[in-house]
Amino acid sequence: MRVVVATTTDDPWAEVFWGSYYRAGGIPPVAVCFLRPRRKAPVWKTALEGLLLFGPLGGAGAWMASQRTRAILERRPEQIFAGTTQFHRLSTLNKGEGFQFLERAAPDLFISAGSPEIFKAPVLRLATVGAVNVHNGRLPAYRGLFGSFWEAFKGEEWGYASVHVMAAEVDAGPVLAQGAVRLAGRSLPDVLAAKKQLGGKLLAWLVRYVEKVEGFPPPCPQAPRDTPGYYTWPSLREMGALTLKRLRPWSRRPAAGGPPVDTWPVEVALGDK
């Protein structure tokens, strides 16, 4: 089966995610497309965001880890994408050289994992089985950017990783696999690492399923309360508010019981109790 991946060299958690994917038996992509990041923030703002989200030591550690991962993806991507020999650096897949490459690659399954680009219908139609995205958040409740932040900001006890079919509307396609990790009492870097490990495992399960049946599994059941929401990148004020909230002692006591939303498939969830 031909798997093509769209991602970015600006993903600090790439090594964690793809390491989990390969350990779970994921198929090596025939090609990986690194797309140019779309969000451009001043250096001072990026540093302040890291300080607010991760703290002084955590922010410095996250920055160093991201620099190391970026260097690997730019110079030795095969170190993370074992078994893949085609790596392409493109500005877009929606038109021009990128779209033409994707046509020639003729993917059975097209995967977006940390990709900065919203793909249009012609791209989504190129894969014979379909196109999927890995999203760090419960769907459809936390569509959009930085779902992990907004789950914590809204006081959720559990955070989710979801693999869904890509549709014309962002993060609106059927969810094919999802699992949960606890949020309460954990640092944001710990939550993000746990979600990336779970997301890689979920994606590997899905890829193996598609390889076996040449189609997608039934969609994941959704809880009745799971009303759609769409979130943009948080402001500095919102980041600061979350930091203060997580410093309060009573906010660190996890509740008993499991997640309120079904996980799917059963054999790979829950991700982290």
Image: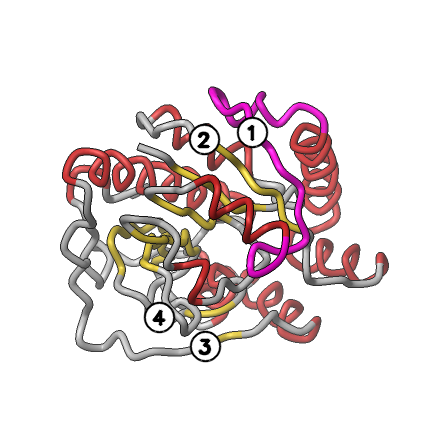
Q: Nearer the viewer, residue 193 or 273?
A: 193
Judging by the rendered image, the residue that carries numbered circle 4 is 172
Q: Residue 5 location, x and y as percent?
A: 47, 42
Q: Residue 17 location, x and y as percent?
A: 47, 37
* Dot placed on the residue nearer the N-terminal end, 1 or 3: 1
Q: Secondary structure at mark 4?
A: loop
Judging by the rendered image, the residue that carries numbered circle 1 is 86
* Dot placed on the residue nearer the N-terminal end, 2 or 1: 2
Disc on res. 230: 3
Image-quadrant location for residue 11: top right
- Magenta-span inclusion, residue 29: no
Q: Amino acid at mark 3?
A: Tyr
* Dot placed on the residue nearer the N-terminal end, 3 or 2: 2
Q: Is residue 18 above or below residue 111?
A: above
Q: Secondary structure at mark 1?
A: strand
Disc on res. 30: 2
Give the quadrant of the N terminus.
top left
Image-quadrant location for residue 211: top left
Q: Secondary structure at mark 2?
A: loop
Spatial CA distance of label 4 from label 2 is 27 Å
| Residue at 45%, 30% in the rendered image | 30
Spatial CA distance of label 4 from label 3 is 10 Å
Q: Residue 200 location, x and y as percent?
A: 39, 38
178 left or right, relative to 239:
left
Q: Residue 214 location, x and y as percent?
A: 19, 41
Q: Residues within 10 Å of mark 4 (few under 14, many from 20)?
A: some
